[in-house]
Amino acid sequence: MPEMPLDGRRFTDEEVRKILKKAVERTSSKSLVKPEGLSLEELKSIAAEVGIDAVRVEDAARAVVLGGGNKPNLFFGGPTNLDFERKVEGQLDPKDTPEILSLIRRTMGTQGEVDEIHGSLEWRAKGDSGERYVTVSPRDDTITVTASANLTNGAVVTFLPAGILGTLASVVAFATAANNASAVGMIFGLGLLPTVYSVLRTIFRRFSQKESIKLQRVVDELARLTEGGGG
């Protein structure tokens, strides 16, 4: 099959993402940066060449450097408790409350409930999959934005029903194979439970990753919205 010429080709957004991802993967054995590393401004400059917003680069850098505190639960495969925080200079203007709440609800994807406590604004949402909190707290000339989640309920909902069914299926498959003296069936029965467990870990890990992305995003967006406010 003749090789397709690329010089005149225009690549779509999805193709650009895939190409860059694959290019980085193929250079993983070599250093991508100079020995002393790159500054944030240098990262932004490189990103600008491929049309990536500098603000998004800074958000991503902050997530990589500061987001490692949310350690995964060894059993569930993903963090059950998530915490993100940013501090910016500024004062909380009550007139900004509707915009702040709109941003939180839009990013988190749910209406939630709101309280104002000692000048701080707290948004919370509780459901079967867990509890989520976003707080905007002014103090002197500093605003602290925090976002957190307790995903223990989500882990239980993910693992408990499917885990019980997986265990029963494994026991039944093993017992049936043993009665039929089927070595292959017995091996299948024994292997079914760890397979189910591995799948459930993957499901919960992806769920917690999605929640992490939302919480990090809402903290970054609120920090930008409130920074320098009230002056």
Image (cartoon, rainbow, N blue to C red):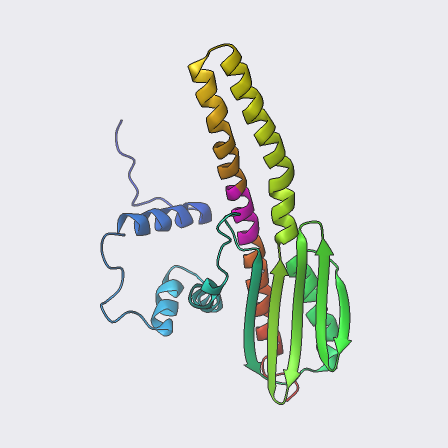
Residue 80 belongs to the span the image colors magenta: no
Q: Residue at x 39, y 63 (%)?
A: 47
Name the spot of residue 64 as percent of width and height, x first: 43, 63
Residue 227 horizontal side relative to residue 35, left or right: right
Classify the position of the C terminus by image quarter.
bottom right
**Image coords of residue 162 (percent x, y):** 61, 35
Q: Tell how many labels.
A: 0
Task: Pick the quarter of the image with the N terminus.
Answer: top left
**What residue is at 51 percent from the left and 51 percent from the top?**
78
Q: Position of residue 226 (x, y in %)?
A: 62, 78
Residue 208 among magenta residues: yes
Q: Nearer the viewer, residue 110 or 76?
A: 76
Rendering quarter of residue 3 = top left
Please tell me in which quadrant of the rendered image residue 211 appears. bottom right
User: What's the residue at 47%, 26% (across, down)?
Assistant: 190
Q: Residue at x 54, y 18 (%)?
A: 175
Among all residues in the image, which is located at the extreme top? 180
Q: Nearer the viewer, residue 205 or 34?
A: 205
Nearer to us in this view, 123 or 160: 160
In the shown orientation, is residue 205 left or right of residue 101? left
Q: Is residue 63 visible?
A: no
Task: Out of 129 and 19, give the one closest to the viewer.
Answer: 129
Left or right relative to 149: residue 42: left
Res. 106 in view: yes
Vertically, is 230 above or below 74? Answer: below
- Specify start and end residues of the magenta stretch as a single range: 201-209
Q: Main secondary structure of the magenta part?
A: helix
In the picture shown, does residue 173 fall above or below 90? Answer: above
